[in-house]
Image: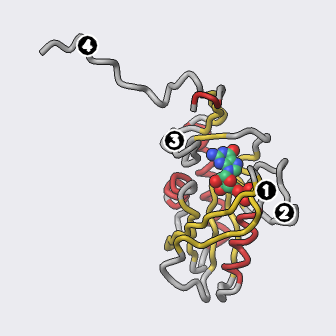
Amino acid sequence: MSNESVRPAATEFSNPNLRVMYSQEVIAARIAELGREIAADYAGKELVLVGVLKGSCVFLADLMRAIDLPLTIDFMSVSSYKDGTVSSGDVEILKDLSNPIRGKHVLVVEDIVDTGLTLTRLLEILGSRGADSIRLATFLDKPEPRIKKDLKIDYIGFTIPNEFVVGYGLDAAGRYRNLPFIGVVIDPSVI
Ligand code: 5GP
């Protein structure tokens, strides 16, 4: 059978509708720095990384391998209800932690902090469970739309302008999480 009618494979990583904001190499260098910083801060402590599904999965996978300490990981999944496009701050736990955090040092790992409403509520929920400390690491910080101005972020990968970004775990309607870079969708009408 001839191959002539076979269409070329779709290439997502070189999709012309994406503008690269942070390349794979730049991301790797920043994660290595963050990992060293976190390892120094948590030396001798029982560290649990808590990934917030699904967006943080890529960041968590890279960050944990950059932290040269004994540690464990756990996951939570929450849904935040939106009033229109703005999250209302109401959070429902879809998947809770598998193990107790009492007496542990918890580092919550997020993909991006935007309004801060979801995370503020999540930190309140975790705050009642007897952890020795709870801190926050986010890959991206988008401070402009922040509603919860007092939300303290302990580790930030990159601070970005108020643009909708995809890749490295972040999606648009479920797509683009597998991009190895952070990008901006140039024409969102063709997502
Ligand atoms: P907030 O901080 O507003 O409560 O919600 C943060 C959540 O909104 C993130 O975990 C992420 O799911 C989503 N989000 C916020 N900004 C962006 C963005 O630029 N790109 C993507 N893909 N998701 C975003």
- Front residue of 160 and 133: 160
Instruction: Work out whether mark 2 precedes mark 3 in sequence or the reverse, and give the earlier one.
Output: 2
- Front residue of 69 and 137: 137
* Color style of the picture: secondary structure
Residue 157 can be seen, yes or no: no
| Res 42 → quadrant | bottom right
Label 4 lies in ligand 1 vicinity (Cβ under 8 Å): no
Instruction: Work out whether mark 1 precedes mark 2 in sequence or the reverse, and give the earlier one.
Output: 1
What amino acid is at disc 2? Lys
* Residue 8 image offset from top left, x and y in percent: 34, 19
> For the point 60% across and 67% down, which residue is it?
78
Gap between marks 4 and 2 measured at Cα: 55 Å
Find disc 2 in the rendering and name its residue: 148
What amino acid is at disc 1? Thr
What amino acid is at disc 3? Arg
* Residue 133 image offset from top left, x and y in percent: 69, 80
CB contact under 8 Å: marks 1 and 2? yes
Residue 32 falls left or right of residue 88: left
Q: Nearer the viewer, mark 4 or mark 1?
A: 4
Find disc 3 in the rendering and name its residue: 175
> For the point 12% across and 15% down, which residue is it?
1
Gap between marks 4 and 3 measured at Cα: 27 Å
Label 3 lies in ligand 1 vicinity (Cβ under 8 Å): no
> For the point 52% across and 46% down, which residue is it?
174
Residue 136 falls left or right of residue 14: right
| The C terminus sits in image quarter | top right
Sort mark 2 into few (<14), some (14-19) or many (20+) by Cα contacts within 10 Å: some
Gap between marks 1 and 2 measured at Cα: 6 Å
